[in-house]
Amino acid sequence: MSGAVRILLVEDDLDIANALIPALRRYGLMVTHVRTAADALAADPGDLVLLDLGLPDGDGINVCRQIRTVSDVPVIAVTARGEAADRVRGLRSGADDYVVKPFAPRELVARVRAVLRRTQAEPEQGSVVTAGRIALEPASRTCTLDGVEVDLTRLEFDLLAELASHPRTVYTRERLLEKVWGHQTPVGGKTVDVHVANLRRKLDGWGGIVAVRGVGYKLDPEAA
Ligand code: CA
């Protein structure tokens, strides 16, 4: 990454913002701070958005959805409501990660850096993606397991490539449908399960595609 990494901080609580901004700046991150949903949507999202879900003029989840319609910028949702339902809702709206208040500024900075590492390490088109025992070559659309080629359908390849492009990131079925099948798909989440089952069978029992109960799937490159 060349140049300073720019963070858009969307947070109406000034105590939190005033604690976070210096912590982020200490890591060389450039911070733009806004306090409302309207200002968040008008601002340049930069390289990463830190998004409070409880904003004075609207729900941060709607802000996240609107950002997602125009940009793939990573979003970390910040929620005061530490309930599981909110977390899942945050991920479904397209957030890459979430943090529950209260948190230590250094914990949030660590999350920011982890998400940036993941999202900025995305491979160039044509380069090989490796995730543990599997390797994917987008240009020729070949997949190998322990060096042996595996015959995948177009959708199976795209599904595996999507999961492998963000290892350890949990994808909801909705997000996978959107990414792999496209926005206007008429199929439901069950389709994802069927393709995952086929993939697992073809990948000869490799345990790298992990179901996350009640949410979706992630890829664990360290799986046996
Ligand atoms: Ca708030």
Image: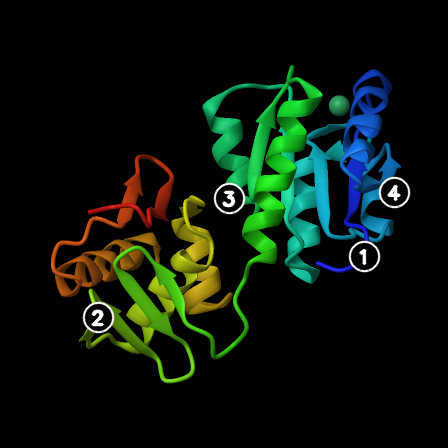
- Give the residue at x 56% y 58%: 121
**Nearer the N terminus, badge 4 or badge 1?**
1
SS at circle 3? helix
Mark 1 Cα within 10 Å, few/some/many (few <14, many 20+)? few
Q: Nearer the viewer, mark 3 or mark 1?
A: 1
Reply above or below: 210 against 166: above
Mark 3 Cα within 10 Å, few/some/many (few <14, many 20+)? many
**Nearer the N terminus, badge 1 or badge 2?**
1
Q: Quadrant of residue 107?
A: top right
Mark 4 Cα within 10 Å, few/some/many (few <14, many 20+)? few
Disc number at residue 147?
A: 2
- Give the residue at x 25% y 46%: 223
Could you say where residue 57 lies in the image, as x and y percent from the top left?
Answer: 82, 32
**Is 178 displayed left or right of 34 in the figure?**
left
For mark 1, what is the residue? 3
The answer for how far apart the CA atoms under marks 4 and 1 are is 25 Å
**The N terminus: image quadrant:** bottom right
**Residue type pointed to by label 2:** Gly
Q: Nearer the viewer, mark 4 or mark 1?
A: 1
**Nearer the N terminus, badge 4 or badge 3?**
4
The answer for how far apart the CA atoms under marks 4 and 3 are is 23 Å
The answer for how far apart the CA atoms under marks 3 and 1 are is 31 Å
Q: Nearer the viewer, residue 6 or 57?
A: 6
**Residue type pointed to by label 3:** Arg
SS at circle 4? helix
